[in-house]
Amino acid sequence: MLKIEKQLVIDFGKGDAKAAASLFEQLRRPLFAYFYRLSFDRCVAEDLLQETLLTIHSRIETYNHEFAFMPWVWAIARNKFLEFKRSQSRVVRLIPQLVRSNQPAASFCDASDTGADLHNCLDTLSESTKEAFVLKHFQGMTFNEIAELQQIPLPTAKSRVLFAIKKIREYFNRGEL
């Protein structure tokens, strides 16, 4: 998982513009990847990234420097994604193909066909299972960190990730490619 220098966060909290730029540059890529891998939509990922960075900026005074910075950031990011999902459940999409991109990001996977297949497979999973898998295998979080972020018991975090792996293996072994 990404490690952020404590002094950088302190300087950011004091209003240092250079610290803010440096911090946001370090956060941009992992947060965008997290949002993209959950939504498979570049526009959504970019919007959620911006909302998350704005929230971090506006709430930095609430951050307790006695604790690690990244779990606080991931909690904000997760809450932004959950807010987005709740808002989407209330919206009727008349033309889904205009709203959602069907092309995976080039950085998602080396082979675009495999990336598209993984995208399709992950879309069959529940949001919580997909999120656990993405956090473990793309963001490098430990099971303990996933359990804490999702506010679930450790065995549940492990079972979600293992269930996702099982479904991915089944998908690729069935020859649905």
Image (tube, helix red, strand yellow):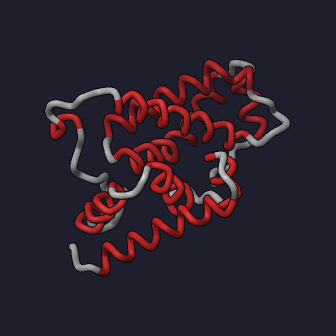
The single residue placed furthest to the right in the displayed view is 66
Which residue corresponds to the image point at 39% horizontal and 57% vertical from the top-left?
125
Query: Is 35 on the left-hand or right-hand side of 61?
Result: left
Give me the residue at 55% from left, 34% from top.
79
Q: How many marks?
A: 0
From the image, which quarter does the N terminus lie in?
Answer: bottom right
Q: Is residue 21 above or below residue 159?
A: above
Up the image or down, 135 lies above or below 72; here it is: below
Q: Position of residue 90 (x, y in %)?
A: 34, 27
Residue visible at 32% across and 41% down in the picture: 42
158 or 15, which lies in front?
158
Determine whether 77 is above or below 162 in the image. Answer: above
Where is residue 159? Give x, y as percent: 57, 66
Instruction: Name the one closer to the observer, 129 or 103.
Output: 129
Residue 153 located left or right of residue 111: right
**Residue 105 position within the rendered picture, expressed as x and y whole percent measured from the top left:** 31, 52
- Residue ID at (18%, 37%): 96
Quadrant assignment, res 57? top right
Say left or right for 35 vs 12.
Answer: left
155 and 15: which is toward the camera: 155
Q: In which quarter of the image is the C terminus?
A: bottom left
Residue 35 image offset from top left, x and y in percent: 44, 43
